[in-house]
């Protein structure tokens, strides 16, 4: 079976490939589909998705709901983990610490990053995450902790 990362590299090279990959990835976990994300980047130590500002992700004050932002952060982290985790290991998120630092009053770009050194310290692997507006204003920042163990 093809890995998620190899599927991304193959599909993203095709016309409409990122859109189709985003739809498939959104179905992997049903709540990913609820945020209408678009995968922007998937590479070792990096994952990035965008969340449009749509009625279905808004809260009572008209900003992107904090939990929708966290879903985007988790989706970005999943892309990073799929592209980075060694083939003889498996990963599982074990916790998320986030801070809401500004209103998410527009579409969000959710990114997840790590370093090779982060993965050497396992089994606990910290992944840095942030959600930002198009102007670069960070609205949510934090860490998702992964548990990485041999298969």
Image: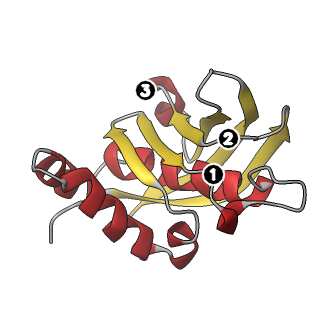
Would you say 114 lies left or right of 22 here?
right
Query: Is residue 24 found left or right of 97 in the rendered image?
Result: left
- Position of residue 97 relative to residue 22, above or below, is above
Task: Tell me the SS state at disc 3.
Answer: helix
Compute the Cα span from label 2 to label 1.
6 Å
Answer yes or no: do the residues labelled 2 and 1 have beta carbons within 8 Å?
yes
Task: From the image, state whether disc 2 or disc 3 is nearer to you.
Answer: 2
Task: List x then y, in percent, for residue 126.
Answer: 62, 38
Direction from residue 31 to residue 91 in the image, left or right: left
Q: Mark 1 points at which residue?
A: 53
Residue in the picture at 53% in, 67% down: 32
Q: Earlier in the sequence, mark 1 or mark 3?
A: 1
Find the distance from the CA under tag 1 to the CA under tag 3: 33 Å
The x, y position of residue 3, in whole percent, is 22, 61
Q: Residue 116 carries which label?
A: 3
Residue at 47% x, 32% y is 120
> Disc 2 designates what residue?
106
**The C terminus, quarter of image:** bottom left
- Mark 2 or mark 1, which has the lower sequence index? 1
Q: Position of residue 20 (x, y in %)?
A: 25, 63
Q: In which quarter of the image is the N terminus?
A: bottom left
Q: Which mark is drawn over residue 7?
A: none
Q: Residues within 10 Å of mark 1 (few under 14, many from 20)?
A: some
């Amino acid at each position: 079976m093809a890995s998620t990362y190899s599927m991304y590299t193959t599909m993203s090279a095709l016309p409409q490939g990122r859109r189709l990959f985003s739809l498939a990835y959104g179905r992997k976990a049903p709540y990913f589909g609820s945020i209408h994300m678009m995968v922007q980047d998937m590479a070792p130590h990096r994952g990035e998705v965008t969340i449009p500002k749509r009625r279905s992700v808004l809260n009572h004050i008209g900003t992107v709901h904090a939990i929708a932002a966290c879903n985007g952060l988790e989706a970005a982290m999943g892309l990073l983990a799929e592209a980075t985790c060694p083939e003889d290991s498996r990963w599982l998120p074990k916790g998320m610490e986030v801070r809401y630092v500004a209103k998410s009053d527009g579409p969000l770009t959710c990114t997840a990053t790590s370093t090779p050194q982060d993965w050497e310290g396992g089994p606990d692997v910290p992944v840095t995450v942030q959600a930002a507006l198009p102007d670069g204003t960070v609205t949510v920042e934090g860490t998702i902790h992964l548990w990485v163990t041999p298969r």
